[in-house]
Amino acid sequence: MRILMTVLLWCWAVAALAVIETYEFSSPELEARYHALSQELRCPKCQNQNIADSNAPIAQDLRKQLYQQLESGASDEEILDYMVARYGEFVRYRPEMAGPTLILWLAPVLLLAAGVVVALLVLRSRRGDRDRGLSEEEQRKLQEMLEREQDA
Amino acid sequence: MAPRLKLFLPLILFAVLALFLFRGLSLDPRAMPSALIDKPFPVFSLPALESGETLDRSLLLGKVSLVNIWATWCISCRVEHPYLNQLTEAGIHIVGVNYKDDDESAKRWLADLGNPYSINIVDAAGNLGLDLGVYGAPETYFVDAEGVIRYRHVGVIDERVWRSKLAAIYAEIGGELPPSLAGAGS
């Protein structure tokens, strides 16, 4: 029990450490937008984290920038454009649907479509085998066998 | 014949997959192209480390420059420092950006390790770094005589990188390459 408590306390301590800086927002709406955007912007240094999760100095700078721009009244679009102008489409987890990122957007749909086509083809050829029924030749042989059975 | 060909399908798929995976071995997943390639160097107005006078981007006009982002807290910067000294000695124009650093430590660093920079821009708040899309020091921007960014190198510059890659880029954007710094290919 004591060990469990220690472990739990330790977890709690780690969680408390993970809270990074806090900003005072002038309205709850800005705060909500801050959270949404910081989830969507990717940290350039630690490439598989968004800037909300990362403690890298560059992520802190970008959060500060995000906060300042939100407070000065910038729209989401303007903020994303600002970030993309400096760090490229890379910095967005949902990049613009154009140019080289097009394949990222389309590949899943295309692969799914290809999968559906293959599945349909396989299913059709299987059903073909099963529903084909007997040919005339087979029908005749079957008839013969049945008659022989009756005769015996 | 057709069913026979079908048998080879897995082999073909495997070959294609292997080709992609093999290519992936030599790709750097951390490589990130700069968004500022072929764009003018961002406008700035920041003090010089040495004299305190205000500098702006006219500093970069008229000749090809390397703009090196460095800081005393950056360990890799210390690694590349001796090679930057060599580049300067050979006549390459290097402008330093002292990024999110303390002026006194920076001056001490230059006094101790030598100063390869023709001038140092103090970017204490990191705003110029942000405008440049810097995500970690050291980074080096190749700026042509019109003040346009033509290339970005992330990480340490050493003799190997210089000769195998950077020398050619420097020459291509109009930089005069001293014979002692020629690339491996030339």
Image: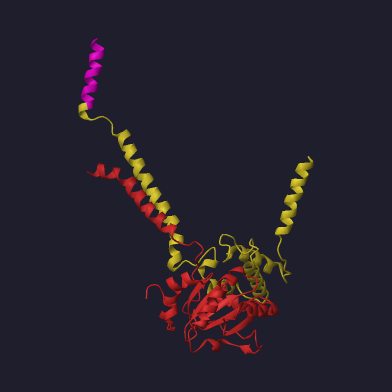
Chain colours: A yellow, B red
**Extreme residue toward the right, this view:** A2
Residue at image position (46%, 65%) is: A101
Q: Residue B38 in the image: x percent, y percent?
A: 46, 79
Q: Main secondary structure of the magenta part?
A: helix
Q: Quadrant of the C terminus of chain A?
A: top left
Q: Residue at x 21, y 29 (%)?
A: A136
- Is residue A107 toward the left or the right of residue A18 in the image? left
Report which quarter residue B19 is drawn in: bottom left
Q: Determine whether A114 is above or below B96 in the image.
A: above
Magenta span has B106? no
Q: For the N terminus of chain A, which image quadrant?
A: top right
- Residue A94 appearing in the image: yes
Q: Give the residues in magenta.
A: A138-152
State yes or no: residue A141 in magenta. yes
In this rendering, the answer to whether A95 lies above or below A123 is below
Q: Residue at x 54, y 89 (%)?
A: B58
Residue A34 x/y as whole percent: 65, 67
Question: Please, which residue is most extreme toward the top here?
Answer: A152
Give x and y (percent) for residue A82.
57, 75
Question: Which picture quadrant has residue A27?
Answer: bottom right
Residue A77 spot, x, y in % from top left: 57, 72
Q: From where the camera sits, is residue B136 visible? A: no
Q: Which residue is more in the foreground, A13 or A41?
A: A13
Q: How many marks can you see?
A: 0
